[in-house]
């Protein structure tokens, strides 16, 4: 009988679409949803695409444009955005151009000639130019001589007056359907409610469009909320210095932007301001410097927004409270557009409310004021919330999320959970018995047995739920109400009045078919820093490749990410390809870039590998046992948890951590003890000296352990003169 060999399965041959993806853009696989959208576009279907920032919207029209005969016309509202996209396409060897007011008449003439000669596959224009009487004849000539294979309308929410950035000139784009009835239309936007999607379809006269609404979840983003206090600037410095890349810091006012940018500059941070009070040239220069990595941080108002095409932003900090949750989602979403890990931090203070409420009061329409105040309340609910940050965000956009995302402060450092099903039944029952006509405050007043005029007016003191919640504080009931709303167990109207409404899940709770758990806030939340688990060697090579990329980008006067994105550099650092063939196989490397940049990057990698092989091990590298402790610490485990997991004594683990700190290994001291305790120990050391632990222990009145003192002293000995940074 013949024996059958167990050969490994043969590698799957890439499909024609995957081959085109690799050829033009260097990627090995599509992001979720992209393949189906592209296939529908190749079948000349009208499309409506709602895909969050970083989801890969541009590829959805760029790849079909390259595979279909003729020209794709892309409608874009911002000059900076269209120029960035064209530059990125050209840097991949793709024929693309734009026509806007920045071009001289000679440059415009050359661009038009290139289009008519078939050397251009994508043309970017603003809606005003596209529909102008001067431009239409040229478009007719293009259609006649080479053909128009599609119109891609970017930022399509601008079509709808219900959208967050309505632009009247976008309404005129309906003319495209009348003038070019056989040319398919693709509308794309990052955010759109169901009402806005319907309006886009009607205003653009889309014909039975295929609608693709992607999840609003950005799993690569870490979300956290920190209380704003006197030490917040020091925490901001820590975020910037440990991020290892570019970042944006948002402030509410122009004055705050200027002050904070200047303060960061004095702290040796390369920071620039950006706000509407600056002239166009100043803003343009600062934006270019930021995009090209000549400055690490942009401190900005919301004026710095939609036109920024920089995928490698590693952190976004809201130093002041945003006005609403939608704005926060969009602004924080400018981090990590390359799909790599990024951090989104919000500093929360009730003091910011006065500024926002003043801005709301300036609105002339009372209904607009009511809606703005309700949106602000939802923003505060997010900041105060103890549930998973993603659950709160996604519920705002009508998307259910199960929670436990493991990539936000609430999930990574969970608060104690309590079963509040009985309290939830009381609350929901009160909503039902009061006729679903009131908001959170009134329901809580009824539950707690208040005797105010409103309760007497509606005779709610006669309800069976009146006074049954006296055993819980007002804050407890508010926490429960937020939890019910965030978890989709209760609805709320969005017309500015915040009326509570029951849904099917509400009745499941009341019928004892669903359990409700509430996360209880803790009194003190330690500041924690995200640190990636890359080896020191990978990190060192990654930094060298970033320097080489910056050098090449400066030579060509392009932003560094247009040479290679961070994700591709990281693959180079991890895989260390030392031949052009291996280099070309990396995700994100197209043949055009192998030819253009390959030799320089491969040479840098080869040189680094030779240095590593010949290097003598450094004396301050951690031992194997210390390295294991470090890895567990970076996973978020406390010293006690590490000791239990490793079956070692807590004092041994503390000894490992102090030695790691002194040898400048990436230990996050803010994860080990809160900043306030660090500060007091530091003051004691400055007073009595660091030679002996006992005087420090006595000076602090025995309120601090020897372990805490050891950690702070080790941090100082490592050469850091400011704790945590």
Image (tube, rainbow, N blue to C red):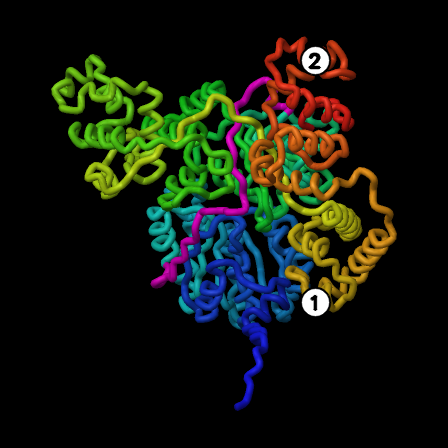
Q: Which of 639/568 is in front?
A: 639
Residue under pointer 1: 591
Q: Quadrant of residue 440?
A: top left
Q: Which of labels 1 and 2 is toward the front?
A: 2
Q: Is residue 355 above or below residue 482?
A: above
Asked whether residue 145 is in view, the answer is no
Reading the chain from its start, which is encountered first: label 1 or label 2? 1
Look at 61% across and 54% down and name the residue there: 85
Q: Which of 233/555 is in front?
A: 233
Q: Is 703 on the left-hand or right-hand side of 499?
A: right
User: CA–CA distance between discs 1 and 2?
Assistant: 63 Å
Q: Which of 62/577 is in front?
A: 577
Q: Secondary structure at mark 2?
A: helix
Q: Does the magenta-highlighted stretch encompass residue 475?
A: no
Residue 707 pos. (x, y %): 65, 23
Q: Which residues are magenta?
A: 206-234
Residue 42 pos. (x, y %): 48, 70
Look at 49% across and 65% down and name the residue there: 35
Q: Is residue 109 above or below residue 373?
A: below
Q: Is 357 on the left-hand or right-hand side of 583?
A: left
Label pair 1/2, CB-CB below 8 angstroms:
no
Look at 59% across and 71% down and name the residue there: 19
Local crowd at mark 2 within 10 Å, few (<14), some, or many (≥20)?
A: many
Q: Quadrant of residue 454?
A: top left
Mark sitting on residue 696: 2
Q: Is residue 554 above or below residue 280?
A: below
Asked whether residue 383 is in view, the answer is yes
Residue 350 pos. (x, y %): 46, 20
């Amino acid at each position: 009988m013949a024996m059958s060999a167990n050969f490994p399965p043969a590698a799957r041959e890439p499909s024609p679409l995957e081959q085109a993806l690799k050829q033009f853009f260097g990627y090995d696989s599509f992001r979720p949803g992209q393949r189906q959208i592209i296939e529908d576009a190749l079948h000349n279907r009208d499309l409506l695409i709602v895909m969050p920032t970083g989801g890969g919207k541009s590829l959805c029209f760029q790849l079909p444009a390259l595979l279909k005969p003729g020209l794709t016309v892309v409608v874009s509202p911002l000059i900076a955005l269209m120029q960035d996209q064209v530059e990125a396409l050209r840097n991949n060897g793709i024929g693309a151009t734009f026509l806007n007011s920045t071009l001289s008449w000679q440059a415009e003439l050359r661009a038009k000639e290139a289009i008519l000669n078939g050397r251009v596959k994508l043309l970017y224009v603003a809606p005003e130019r596209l529909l102008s009487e001067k431009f239409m004849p040229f478009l007719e000539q293009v259609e006649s001589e080479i053909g128009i294979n599609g119109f891609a309308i970017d930022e399509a929410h601008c079509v709808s007056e219900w959208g967050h950035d309505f632009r009247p000139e976008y309404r005129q784009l309906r003319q495209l359907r009348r003038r070019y009835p056989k040319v398919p239309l693709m509308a794309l936007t990052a955010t759109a409610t169901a009402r806005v999607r319907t309006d886009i379809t009607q205003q653009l006269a889309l014909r039975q469009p295929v609608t693709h609404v992607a999840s609003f979840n950005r799993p690569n983003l870490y979300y956290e909320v920190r209380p704003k206090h006197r030490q917040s600037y020091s925490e901001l410095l820590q975020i910037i210095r440990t991020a290892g890349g570019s970042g944006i810091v948002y402030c509410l006012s122009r004055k705050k932007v200027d002050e904070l940018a200047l303060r960061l500059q004095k702290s040796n941070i390369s920071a620039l301001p950006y706000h509407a009070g600056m002239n166009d040239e100043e803003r343009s220069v600062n934006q270019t410097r930021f995009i090209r990595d000549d400055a690490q941080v942009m401190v900005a108002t919301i004026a710095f927004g939609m036109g920024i095409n920089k995928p490698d932003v590693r952190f976004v900090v809201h130093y002041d409270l945003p006005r609403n949750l939608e704005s926060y989602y969009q602004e924080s979403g400018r981090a990590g557009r390359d799909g790599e890990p990024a951090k989104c931090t919000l500093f929360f203070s009730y003091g910011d409310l006065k500024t926002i409420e003043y801005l709301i009061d300036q609105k002339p329409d009372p209904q607009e004021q009511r809606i703005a105040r309700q949106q602000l309340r939802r923003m505060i609910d997010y900041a105060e919330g103890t549930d998973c940050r993603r659950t709160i965000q996604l519920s705002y956009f009508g998307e259910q999320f199960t929670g436990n995302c493991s990539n936000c402060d609430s999930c990574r450092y969970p608060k104690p959970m309590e079963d509040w099903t009985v309290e939830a039944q009381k609350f929901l029952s009160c909503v039902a018995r009061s006729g679903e006509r009131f908001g959170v405050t009134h329901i809580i007043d009824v539950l707690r047995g208040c005797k105010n005029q409103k309760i007497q007016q509606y005779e709610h003191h006669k309800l069976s739920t009146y006074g049954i919640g006296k055993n819980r504080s007002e804050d407890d009931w508010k926490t429960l109400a937020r939890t019910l709303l965030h978890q989709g167990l209760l609805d709320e109207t969005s017309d500015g009045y915040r009326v509570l409404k029951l849904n099917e899940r509400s009745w499941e709770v009341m019928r004892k078919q669903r359990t409700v758990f509430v996360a209880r806030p803790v009194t003190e939340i330690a500041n924690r820093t995200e640190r990636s688990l890359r080896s020191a060697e990978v990190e060192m090579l990654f930094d060298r490749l970033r320097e080489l990329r910056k050098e090449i980008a400066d030579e060509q006067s392009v932003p560094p990410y247009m040479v290679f994105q961070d994700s591709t550099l990281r693959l180079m650092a991890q895989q260390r390809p030392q031949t052009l063939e291996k280099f070309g196989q990396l995700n994100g490397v197209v043949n055009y870039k192998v030819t253009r940049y390959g030799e320089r990057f491969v040479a840098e990698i080869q040189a680094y590998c030779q240095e590593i092989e010949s290097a003598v091990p450094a004396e301050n590298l951690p031992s194997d046992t210390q390295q294991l402790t470090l890895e567990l610490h970076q996973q978020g485990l406390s010293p006690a948890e590490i000791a239990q997991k490793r079956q070692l004594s807590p004092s041994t683990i503390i000894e490992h951590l102090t030695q790691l700190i002194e040898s400048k290994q990436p230990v996050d001291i803010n994860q080990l003890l809160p900043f306030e305790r660090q500060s007091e120990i530091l003051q004691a050391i400055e007073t009595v000296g660091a030679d002996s632990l006992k005087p420090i222990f006595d000076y602090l009145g025995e309120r601090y352990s020897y372990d805490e003192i050891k950690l702070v002293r080790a941090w100082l000995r490592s050469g850091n003169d400011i704790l945590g940074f």
